[in-house]
């Protein structure tokens, strides 16, 4: 039966080794240099890719024990062709685009919705089922692994090993890291250690084993301790992957039922009031340029300004970056400034990330969170559009490319074309 199969078996699986990085022939002895090379592999400009992961997670607390297994597959073809498949204890999903239409299929319910491909594809916010979160995690796999490779300031090299993943053998470098090796601020009440197996030829992760001793906040003052152990393997990590149109052609089972919205199968989501500054004057705030100069936000007055608050540790922020770049490429010659504020612990982390992806807009490290506080930032990503007179005309969570383009187009006739298709896709 369809729902009983591992979801990755619904497609003919291409067992293709990852495309070798230019640096792959180098014999690495410095673990940090190796991790930086891996980050560059995942940050490569390849428009097409095929990635798969299989994770097993065990979670233990005094009064709770949980084991789960999660399959994730993402195939990105040219343009807006994509297919995402996930299978977890909370449901199995397929999200598929043939370039014209998008299908989202909930396997266990045998229900699907179909609609034109959204301009800011793919979108995941329509679904409220717990398992649907895996769709975004699968799509973000490449970004998440890039950030994993870039997040450590030190590491330990273990002896090399050859491991077998889904029947294929890979000679691997082996690196061990702990939370104390991280560039992030260390939480003294939590500790994690991770062993990483890196394909020597392709410079991609093939296996990750992680042990964490941490806690969750039941209330602001009550901490529930837990142990988490996970093993994740990556059978496929291929950039510039060969694809065919048939891989993105979804045919629902004959007995499947189309519904207007899959979310209608569940209870409506609770609405959460959200602070907004739309309609207000932009606040007075100053911040430091990389060269130490003091910059006033008001110095941008006289031309529209698009702001985005982000951090390299924020998965949704990194997922929305390609959309921001598409907007930047379309407005940079029209008299609009694009500025981002990173909330990383160290500004160097954000600078390295932007350089790896060739993102060329102006970025400021928001040391002390002055800019975030001035804009009453409750979470990131946050996107703010300020018109030439200094009035905030758009204030919302980042990632909604179509909404941001619509707001920019409303600034005046010189920006009207921005509401149309972007010039480039990443």
Image: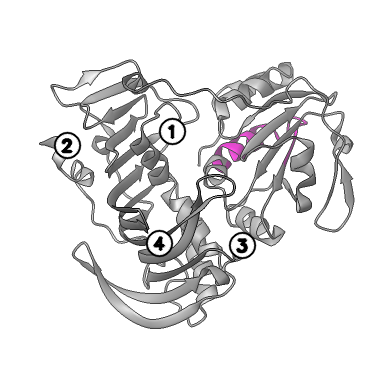
Q: Earlier in the sequence, mark 3 or mark 1?
A: 1
User: What is the x, y in percent for residue 50?
Assistant: 34, 49
Q: Is residue 44 in sight in this rendering?
A: no
Q: Residue 393, percent across and down? A: 73, 22
Q: What segment is highlighted magenta in the picture?
A: 321-339
Measured in 3D between alpha carbons, the distance from the residue under mark 3 to the one under mark 1, in whole angstroms, is: 30 Å
Residue 122 — which label? 1
Q: Secondary structure at mark 2?
A: helix
Residue 168 percent location from the top left of the image: 22, 66
What residue is pinned by disc 4?
227
In depth, the one of 279 and 123 nearer the eye is 279
- Which residue lies at the image location 74% right of the left edge and 17% below the top edge? 412
Q: Which residue is mark 3?
A: 184
Secondary structure under badge 1?
Answer: loop
Q: Is residue 106 above or below residue 19?
A: above
Residues at marks 4 and 2, CA–CA distance in whole angstroms: 31 Å
Q: Say if the magenta span includes residue 426.
A: no
Q: Image quarter for residue 348?
A: bottom right
Residue at the (36%, 32%) spot, across then down: 129
- Considering only order in the chain, which callout, 1 or 4, is on the residue closer to the N terminus? 1
């Amino acid at each position: 039966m369809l729902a009983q199969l591992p979801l990755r078996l619904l497609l003919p699986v291409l067992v293709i080794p990852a495309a070798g990085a230019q640096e792959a022939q180098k014999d690495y002895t410095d673990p940090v240099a190796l991790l930086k090379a891996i980050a560059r592999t995942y940050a490569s400009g390849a428009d097409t890719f095929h990635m798969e992961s299989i994770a097993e997670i065990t979670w233990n607390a005094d009064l709770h024990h949980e084991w789960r297994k999660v399959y994730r597959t993402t195939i990105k073809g040219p343009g807006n062709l994509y297919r995402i498949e996930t299978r977890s204890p909370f449901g199995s999903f397929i999200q598929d685009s043939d370039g014209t239409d998008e299908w989202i299929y909930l396997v266990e319910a045998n229900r699907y919705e179909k609609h034109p491909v959204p301009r800011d594809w793919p979108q995941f916010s329509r679904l409220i089922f717990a398992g649907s979160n895996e769709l975004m995690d699968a799509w973000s796999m490449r970004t998440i692994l890039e950030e994993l490779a870039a997040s450590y300031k030190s590491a330990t090299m273990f002896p090399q090993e050859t491991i077998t993943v889904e029947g294929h053998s890979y000679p691997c470098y082996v690196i061990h890291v702990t939370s104390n090796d991280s560039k992030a601020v260390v939480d003294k009440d939590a500790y994690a250690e991770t062993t990483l197996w890196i394909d020597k030829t392709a410079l991609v992760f093939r296996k990750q084993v992680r042990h964490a001793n941490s806690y969750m906040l039941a209330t602001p003052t009550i901490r529930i301790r837990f142990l988490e152990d996970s093993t994740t393997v990556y059978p496929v990590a291929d950039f510039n992957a060969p694809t065919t149109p048939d891989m993105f052609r979804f045919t629902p089972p004959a007995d499947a039922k189309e519904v207007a919205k899959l979310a209608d199968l569940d209870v409506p989501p609770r609405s959460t009031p959200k602070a907004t500054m739309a309609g207000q004057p932009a606040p007075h705030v100053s911040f430091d340029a990389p060269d130490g100069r003091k910059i006033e936000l008001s110095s941008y007055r006289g031309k529209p300004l698009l702001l985005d608050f982000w951090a390299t540790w924020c998965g949704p922020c990194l997922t929305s970056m390609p959309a921001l770049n598409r907007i930047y490429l379309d407005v940079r010659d029209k008299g609009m400034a694009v500025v981002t504020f990173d909330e990383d612990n160290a500004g160097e982390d954000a600078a390295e990330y932007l350089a790896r992806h060739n993102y060329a807009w102006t970025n400021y490290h928001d040391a002390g969170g002055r800019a975030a506080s001035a804009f009453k930032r409750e979470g990131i990503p946050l996107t703010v559009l300020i018109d030439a007179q200094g009035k905030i005309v758009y204030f919302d969570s980042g990632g909604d490319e179509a909404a941001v383009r619509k707001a920019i187009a409303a600034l005046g006739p010189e920006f009207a074309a921005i509401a149309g298709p972007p010039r480039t896709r990443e």
